[in-house]
Image (cartoon, helix red, strand yellow):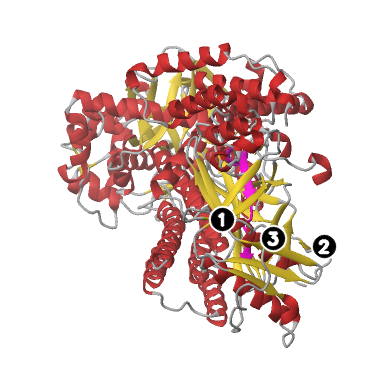
Amino acid sequence: MRRRQGADVLPVTLGRRRLYILPTGAGVAFGLLLFLMLIAGLNYGNSLALFLTFSLSAFALVAMQQCHRNLLGIAVIAAAAPAVFARTTGAVHLTLANPASLPRARVEAAVAEMAAVAVDLAARERQRLELPLPAPTRGIVRIDRLRLATAHPFGLFRAWTWVHTPIEMMIYPRPHGVLPMPAHGGHKSGARSRGGSDADEWLGLRPFRDGDSPRQVDWKAYAREAPMLIKEYSPAGSELRLFDFAQLTHLDTEARLSQLARWVVEAEAHGERYGVALPGVLLPADRGPEHRHRCLAALAVFGIDDGLKHGGGAPGR
Amino acid sequence: MAAAPQAADGAALRSLAWACAAFAGGVLLNLDRVPPWTAATALLLIAWRLTTERSGARLPGTPARALLALGVVAVVLWRFHTLNGLAAGTALLVLMSALKLLETRARRDQFVMVGAGLFLLLAACLDRQSLVRVPLYALQAWLCCSALAVVASAGCEGRAALRLAGRALLLALPLAVLLFLFFPRLSGAFWAIPRGGEALTGLSDTMSPGGIVKLVASYDPAFRVQFAGRAPPAEELYWRGPVLHDFDGHTWRRASGAFHLRQRLQYLGTPYRYRVALEPTRQRWWFALDTPAQSSDANVLLTYDNQLLGAEPLTEPLSFDALSYTRTRALEPLGAFGRQQDTTPPPGNPRSVALAQTLRQRAGSDADFVQATLEYLRSGGFVYTLTPEALGADAVDDFLFDTRAGFCGHYASAFVTLMRAAQVPARVVTGYLGGEWNPIGDYFLVRQSDAHAWAEVWLEGRGWTRIDPTAVVAPERLRRGVFDLLPDALATRERLLRSSAWLTRALQRWDAANAWWSDHVVKFDYSAQLDLLGRFGIRYPDARYLGWAFMLALLGWLAIIAWHIGRSARPAAPDALARAYTRLCHKLARIGPPRAPHQGPLSFAEAVTTHRPDLGGSVHALLARYAQLRYGPGAPGTRAQDIEGFRRAVARLSLSRAAGGRH
């Protein structure tokens, strides 16, 4: 199927060529019932029984159309899985939109073969669904495709389609451990060189990244034909810590990663500046959600070949 | 979170209730066909199942259910002596489906219940096809389809399900009609099915005084007749049914096993061509006007006593064309056997025999004797009543000399007895007399209440001659029908119905609708289908062409349905604002990175500003204006102008690529 329709770039509108439809078990049974009714009606030469049979047959065909139409034209706007900690349940956040004036009912979305989540979409409505995805161990779960299906309105037919959009869910190590945070100032970030006069401490300049506010851009430097830089400040009194993998000698790898994850989470929660040192990886001290993610992600994929686990099922190691 | 399981329970209960309703509807439709205990068991089980679902009691386990199922089969076998046949099959279906209720946990089981509801609807259709039941059948089909919707998605509200199913059924109707008209029918049957032997109201092949009164009280239609040309006058509307020869003193019977050749007849007077639409009688004879000239069907025998006798009992409504005369003359003498059969007087009744012999001796001929007997009945103080006294062992003597009160059966019986006592061949004919003219449908409606009995007498030189002794005693019976003569208790409803012209008219309309339904829908069979195709110019329908035509019709209907249904599934056309915004985004994409799908106008503005700070002001303002128009609280009065202004501003915007070189 994937070969036929290729990978999808969101947003995707579900067209006729990618919708499949087959009778459900109930639909097959219904067909059998209709066949028996036809035989009985023909045998008795009973007009009313035949008319009933034909009405129900036509009804089944209408049901097929309605089922197909219930999925047709739905737009998959976005699909992403935010990072979560191990031993929790993550979710694929899927945004579906109904661009048409026709309300859609019981559209079921599912990650591969897992249990589906059903949603009703009113006319021109857009909704975000959360498809649960278990995250037992650290790493990255990659999902190749999502399934959208519906048996609405009569459960006689089931229309479905696959949306081939790769989604990766980062699973951080479980924040766990009882050791106290290491003392301040183990290593200092090189940028901390100049004292600021105001309450916020001047930290330095760093390259522009997507999402930075234009107000933080150093426009004067830019005017001097320098690359676009961001001025960074830190609140007064913030601390600086380095969490080093190598110093936790008495624990095994997973326990160490869990301990480090816990420190990262706590340090970020207290607004401190922190860095992480792993064998072969050094994340210099910084703070903010992005830094936190970088640190936790480094912990998540540490020691895993490419960090990837395929499929939508329970990721195992 | 706490409310979630409760809501799920509510949905489960709703879906179970709908499945039960679909099944109960099927049971109710068959209420008058299955034995009462069957229906009662099913309805009780439904009620019980619904209460256990509410209270959460345990359902019986597998061994108990298996035992119950075996028990049900045994009981049905015991009561019906068979599992085959519509009545036993329906009863079995009702009971087994009711047992299925004991294990309806999964959605699949509920589908099965809905299927049972549909199957019971089929059984009801096979059993009765009258127009008055059609709305019930339609309701049941609607109920079952709605139940499918509820069972399929437990969250579906009942009202929404009804709407969904109703809409789907309405869309299905055109195809259903097409299929009904053109789906090839069978000219025969795959297998013969034993039909229920329940007696229907109607004439039987015996007549005893009192038997006809039951019919007279019935307002049901017996058959309808449409004449091709002029209709006979009312006093000629004698519809021949069973002709009875054997009389044991109490009951008249058809001749046992006698077979005679039909005499050649000379037909006199007007030929009447007409079409009879019979209601099912579960009897073999077909009713025709007085003396039919020929059999209308290879399977129907025209007997020596002018009955039309079918090969099979009539279980479905049926129509046939016939040609009849009301006056005939025999061209051959009466055979010895026939004479012997129709001159055998009943045992006993000495006074009647004496009377007949006296009258015969006084008369010059058989014809005079007939007249003298009729005169005796006319002047003898006889009374027409539908509530006569009971008669003793010599029934004819008691009637002629003691009670002197009776109705058509008594008079025909006594008259024929008198004839036979004088060695004049005579026989009793039962059938119907008259009929109500329905001006809406241009036909005569003959009801069970028109049942009648008269006599036929063999007169030398003329052959069998119809004599109606009742007409002599109660001439008004012929003119006005029987209702005015009925005792009050029997005819309250009918009197009421006939009391107003408006009501009579409404009844006639209803009957015409029934006749149409019966003629065009119920009796639409293989030959009617050929007729219909012939009307389209297809004289010799070839299965292949029919198949192609059928496929084309099916595809055409599918296309129309797909168009109709798909119409609303297409996204709406973008409005002027959306078009202007798209144009703006295209323009901006030429000078920098295009807008990502997830980017709103404001974040896109920031991205553009970052990329091309020189454009920051104008583009940012434009995108902010779009965001304000699209999402902000706009002033309704000026909205159209604002959108137009935005469109113009977008059109005026010209962006140079040059500044983009710096990054």
- Of the numbered discs 1 and 2, the one sitting upstream in the chain is 1
Residue on which disc 1 sits? A130
Residue on which disc 3 sits? A190
**x and y, in percent, of residue B385 in the image:** 20, 41
Residue on which disc 2 sits? A306
Looking at the rendered structure, the number of numbered marks drawn on it comes to: 3
Answer few, some or many: residues within 10 Å of disc 2's Cα (few below 14, many 20 plus, some between 14 and 19): few
Q: Chain of mark 3?
A: A
Check disc 3 and report its element: helix, strand or loop.
loop
Check disc 2 and report its element: helix, strand or loop.
loop
Where is B472 relative to A145, above or below?
Answer: above
Q: CA distance from mark 3 to mark 1?
A: 42 Å
Q: CA distance from mark 1 to mark 2?
A: 27 Å
Q: Is residue B288 visible?
A: no
**Frontmost residue, A89 versus A296:** A296
Q: Nearer the viewer, mark 1 or mark 2?
A: 2
Where is B403 relative to B335, above or below?
Answer: below
Name the amino acid, label 2: Asp
Name the amino acid, label 3: Gly
**x and y, in percent, of residue A250 in the image:** 73, 88
